[in-house]
Image (tube, helix red, strand yellow):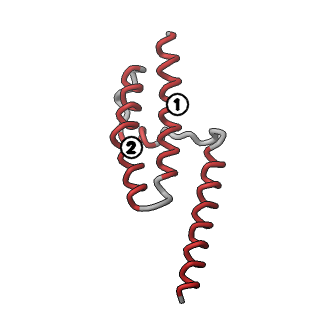
Amino acid sequence: MCQIFYIHTVLKIVILLRAIYEELGKYGSVENQVLCRQRVDDELEPNIRYCLYKMGRSNMNEAELLSLTVQGTPGIDLLKEKLEVRDVLHQVDRNDVNSWKS
């Protein structure tokens, strides 16, 4: 019973990490986006599947796996807001540089 608790805790953490990497992958350069996607595909998804296997839920299909989210987790909305603000500021900086070049 204790082992299942730890596996469930690890599963929640890995799902949170997946959400963070997916959000980070929406911003920045193409290389950054590819790196974030690779991290999710190569490291996090196998760990999610392993945790589910150890919990006896290994028969979940891809859609069910994707539905495992961290909605309502404190900090995810704040992360999204900060990334969006950073992205907007970066675009403004690029526009300023381009207007100086003109």
Spot occupied by residue 91 in the image (x, y as percentages of width and height): 57, 71
Query: Is 68 positioned to the left or the right of 96 in the image?
Result: left
Q: What residue does disc 2 label?
A: 39
Front-most of 63 and 38?
A: 38
Spot occupied by residue 79 in the image (x, y as percentages of width and height): 61, 49
Q: Amino acid at mark 1?
A: Lys
Spot occupied by residue 101 in the image (x, y as percentages of width and height): 53, 85
In this view, 44 is above or below 50: below
Q: What residue does disc 1 label?
A: 12
Give the foreground label among 1 and 2: 2
Front-most of 72 and 32?
A: 32
Determine which quarter of the picture holds residue 32. bottom left
Q: Which mark is residue 93?
A: none
The reply to whether the C-beta atoms of the residues labelled 1 and 2 are less than 8 Å apart is no
Q: Secondary structure at mark 1?
A: helix
Q: Using the numbered discs, state the Cα–Cα distance from disc 1 to disc 2 in whole angstroms.
A: 17 Å
For image coordinates 59% across by 56% down, the residue present is 83
For image coordinates 36% across by 37% down, the residue present is 43
Q: Amino acid at mark 2?
A: Arg
